[in-house]
Amino acid sequence: MRSLITGGAGFIGSHLTEHLLGLGQEVVVLDDLSTGSEHNLAAVADHPGLSFHHGSVNDPEAVEAALQGVDAIYHLAAAVGVFTILDKTLHSLRTNLLGVETVLEAARRHQVPVLLASTSEIYGKNTTEGITEDDDRIVGSPLVNRWSYAEAKALDETYAHLYGVEYGVRSVIARLFNTVGPRQSGRYGMVVPRFVEQALAGEPLTVFGSGEQIRCFCHVLDVVPALVALMADESAYGTAYNIGSNEQISIAELAERVIKATGSTSSVVHVPYQEAYGPGFEDMERRVPDCGKAERTVGFRPQRTLDDIINDVTAERRLRRDSASAAV
Ligand code: NAD
């Protein structure tokens, strides 16, 4: 079995790469290294089953070259993170729309199945607790830049659906809720690594908005096997699955939890959304999934708690800080 992982040098993609290699599969990574890094693949860099292609999913030739002999495609490459989307909105929109079409066209030619990494963002402002895959989207204005990520990902799902209906391309959609763990960058707006880095540096933890927003964080090591199980189960094809945790926490509580876990003396400061993200920014108050469908189909049930996540991210960041100071 040989799998192509687009975005395989990213946070989730690198864990998926290691997992598939561990299962004895060959893995081809296609990544433009825009937010990912070859360092993320350092542990498997010399693995004989891994090949790395530096290129874009928007480039049909790069996708075609990476797809030779491949049996399955995990399409994870995307412009990700609120800061990325707000800084480079048009570029991000293009990446997230064009990439999927290029990949689906290639999947059609080679007749290989695709797992599409979608997002809880597609539910928009629907704050239903225990949101299910059939719940309606409540979308913000198309003129508010923040929603362009959700719009693109929702259209990606529609593309996958229509390529299935009209061309018989097999695909499964994983709607990922907040996924966290070692190697996730805090640079693009991801809250857990950002809080941990601030706590270890003794800097104030910056809570954007009121801090009352409710989120659920799932460990990447729980998410990755679910992606592989969905790809392996043909009964899952043609539909979407929520993948996430339902352990709820407010962002203000998360800041306190990180301070406690790291033993930091940092304080917490609140930064208005407008200051953090610019005028007109909108966010959702609650994002809590019902993952019963994934549990019934592939037995998905997260094993790791939020404390496990914070401890793992802290251990990794401490190691990085230690090796950075040893190198000076
Ligand atoms: P990431 O930024 O670490 O990974 C994205 C990878 O895609 C990076 O390695 C980046 O270099 C690569 N990439 C970007 N544009 C590319 C292009 N044009 N061609 C080739 N490679 C390109 O982010 P992640 O958190 O690992 O996200 C992976 C996927 O999961 C994304 O599709 C994202 O939308 C989805 N997702 C993630 C989360 C989360 O909480 N982390 C939640 C919902 C959905």
Image: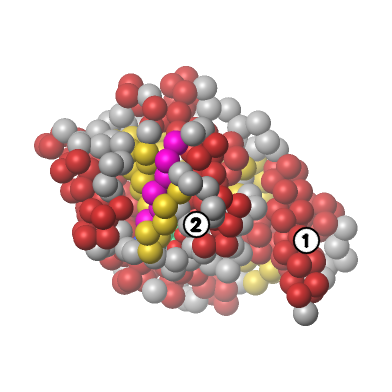
Specify which label sits upstream in the sequence, 2 or 1: 2
Q: Which residue is mark 1?
A: 318
Q: Quadrant of the N terminus?
A: top left
Query: Bounds of the magenta span?
Result: 25-30
Amino acid at the residue labelled 1: Arg
**Where in the figure is residue 233, as x and y percent of width and height?**
38, 24
- Quarter of image, ligand 1: bottom left
At 53% from the left edge and 27% from the top edge, which residue is drawn? 300
| Magenta highlight: main SS | strand
Residue 246 located left or right of residue 265:
left
- Give the residue displayed 24% in from the left and 63% down from the top: 59
Q: Quadrant of residue 264?
A: bottom right
Which residue was labeled with disc 2? 10
Would residue 108 appear left or right of 186 to someone viewing this image? Answer: left
Residue 198 vs residue 170, the one in the foreground: 170
Residue 301 relative to residue 131: left or right: right
Where does the image place residue 45, in percent across and percent down from the top left?
54, 55
Q: Residue at x 41, y 30 (%)?
A: 230
Q: Is residue 148 visible?
A: no
Q: Is residue 168 visible?
A: yes
Of all residues, the one furthest to the left in this rendering is 166
Q: Which mark is residue 56?
A: none
Q: Secondary structure at mark 2?
A: loop
Label 1, secondary structure: give it.
Answer: helix
Name the residue: 50% across, 69% down. Answer: 83
**CB of mark 2 near ligand 1 (< 8 Å):** yes
Give the amino acid at mark 2: Gly
Residue 237 position, x and y percent, is 31, 29
Question: Is residue 185 positioned above or below 174 on the image?
Answer: below
In the image, residue 8 lies at what x, y percent?
Answer: 45, 53
Specify whether tag 1 is near ligand 1 (CB below 8 Å).
no
